[in-house]
Amino acid sequence: MSMAPRADTQSPAPHVADSHDLIRVHGARENNLKDVSIEIPKRRLTVFTGVSGSGKSSLVFDTIAAESQRLINETYSAFVQGFMPTLARPEVDVLDGLTTVITVDQQRLGADPRSTVGTATDANAMLRILFSRLGKPHIGSPKAFSFNVASISGAGAVTMERGGQTVKERRSFSITGGMCPRCEGRGSVSDLDLTQLYDDSKTLSEGAITVPGYTGGGWNSRLYSESGFFDPDKPIRKFTKKELHDFLYREPTRMKIAGINMTYEGLIPRIQRSMLAKDREGMQPHIREFVDRAVTFTTCPECDGTRLNEGARSSKIKRISIADACAMQISDLAEWVRGLDEPSVAPLLTALQQTLDSFVEIGLGYLSLDRPAGTLSGGEAQRVKMIRHLGSSLTDVTYVFDEPTIGLHPHDIQRMNDLLLRLRDKGNTVLVVEHKPETIAIADHVVDLGPGAGTAGGTVCFEGTVEGLRTGGTITGRHFDDRAAVKETVRKPTGTLEIRGARTHNLQGVDVDIPLGVLAVVTGVAGSGKSSLVHGSIPAGEGVVSVDQAAIRGSRRSNPATYTGLLDPIRKAFAKTNDVKPALFSANSEGACPTCNGAGVIYTDLAMMAGVATTCEECEGKRFQASVLDYHLGGRDISEVLAMSVTEAEEFFGAGEAATPAAHRILTRLADVGLGYLTLGQPLTTLSGGERQRLKLATHMAEKGGVYVLDEPTAGLHLADVEQLLGLLDRLVDAGKSVIVVEHHQAVMAHADWIIDLGPGAGHDGGRLVFEGTPADLVAARSTLTGEHLATYVGP
């Protein structure tokens, strides 16, 4: 075989295709960014840092990732784009060198009661196919193993046109599903306490129904009192059997009430459909309070909580049913799948094996596939989303991570760092928004935004290597090597909270006394049982204020003033001074500009194209009617007050003509958690993760309680903000409160008066108490993983 002669010359000039090694951003102005221009190297790991609210997410997610997604969406036909979310082009002059972006954000997985770890990662789908092929006895297709598919059958005549004639044929069908008929695939059944629904000594006319939304003569209560099925002036306890059945359980019936067509339905199915079908976390506080009071949830007696009917549970592979497989710890399930040798389903077993191994590799081997998705923490949810990308063969992709170390113990951070480097080494660009020094340290390139937050941020303070950042003089650089010292003296507890035999989730009969009147930190590796111990054994209720990681929900009409309840005292103060109604000073009520309905902008929907928002010409974006802006308080109108920062407003409402103690108290709390720079009317949708976390903390601080339970309050906080948080926790304890914190941050551990360490591992390897004592004792003993990492952190 002859080979072409090869000229031994100098290597040719690089191909022009290889010259696009940078992502260029020029003139980015999204949210608080101030004409930011940077160049990000491709196929490298770039970390974006800066204080919470400095513009990191605005640059990485709202500019780079959003534009990449928008350009990809534009490659589809207009028909397909009509079904996709429409994205506006970000406020930026030039974006060059973009590649396909895969975003792995911190959004919690859907908290739908039917969503589990298995359904969220496709592991369940693969298991269902596996059991439909190999399960004995064979009961049907993969649908027969799905707890979201009900078994149904039907028969009837169908009419069709054939050869110019109308033909009738009899058809029948049946679908075998796996859903448990009793709990409808939820795993738990709810019983309603009737005494919480109505007062049977009263009549309907007297307001017997006590369900929120059914009182006060509204349409819901009129539906029952004017239905004609029973006498509204007769006490409920005197109803006949038929009347009580019609009141509580009647099937939907069409009727006219006050000339309006309505559907009457028994009170219990109506409440189950309108309230109980929703996720508890998504409910308004007063509805959630009612549901907690009126509903008792018990494990479904028919399926024993597995969500599957008897048929699905009867089909087994090697004496294991699909319910058993989903209940196993994933690390054990991976071993079981590895032991299946069946050439007929080899590709399926390989794919399932890879998915399960990815769980173990990423540190989530302690979960089970039947774990409800809504119970995962923010960090766990983010890592679950990473699973589908780990074994991917794609290269030259841009991966964007939002604080991937949230919820991770220092021991687990090293594993996460290895994964980020592995994605980079496959030839991908990895962009990470991060606060933890351990992850910043592995970066090839660092972009530090700041110098402050909100309007004081939005500029690039530093760009370069990690070494350059250390000496760069920025806030991040100055705090990069901060190490909190272990407390010399600790506070003495004023009492103890006894927990005996705690067995929630993976806890193995834990007995522990949590000291009160001090700062107590509960720590341990991810999955060791910290949240199970704290939230499972210290129920939020009388005297306990619990601040969990659930995200703040809010539309573009919500802002810090409405969320914290600050707007109520402000509206009342304006109304009292001007002798008018408080509703005038709400942009969501009577005071709203009639043209834009109080939104400040007018939205034009352009179908599959991005909608256009234009500032309302009538109110010039102020959201209020012109007549409302004639009323003043302390020389300012309501729109000027909403444009103030928290710090400004605190001064304004603190003294002088505008002094409003109720508003001043709320503003002081917002300033205490470090949100002095936020404007009162800034939409919640524009706040960063760290800002939302602190806004929530400030709101809960108003609640009357002696015990504060905080779940990872440092999530989304810069190193400089952590110091401020520690000061706030100290002030709470000094005011006589007990503070219990679930936390991984070493600075918080070192600052604690008492540490409770769970472990030694995760899942069934955890759930035990491995240490309790002072931080100094933990460092001296070095007997646990936490002890070793804390000792390394505080240094000799």
Image (cartoon, grey):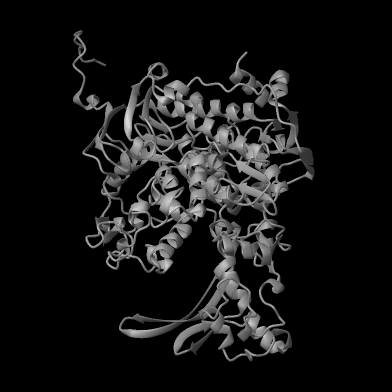
Residue 478, position as x, y percentages in the image: 44, 21
Q: Nearer the viewer, residue 314 or 547?
A: 547
* Left or right placement of residue 194 versus residue 359 in this view: right
Residue 396, position as x, y percentages in the image: 34, 31
Q: Nearer the viewer, residue 407 or 288?
A: 288
* Left or right placement of residue 168 versus residue 249 in this view: left
Q: Quadrant of the C terminus?
A: top right
Residue 340 shows in the view = no
Residue 758, position as x, y percentages in the image: 70, 34
Q: Quadrant of the N terminus?
A: top left
| Quarter of image, res 331 | top right
Position of 411 relative to 241 (above/below): above
**Number of residue marks:** 0
Position of 385 relative to 787 (above/below): below
Residue 219 shows in the view = yes
Q: Nearer the viewer, residue 111 or 390?
A: 111
The residue drawn where x is 48% and y is 58% is 569
| Quarter of image, res 252 | bottom right
Position of 514 relative to 127 (above/below): above
Residue 720, position as x, y percentages in the image: 48, 29
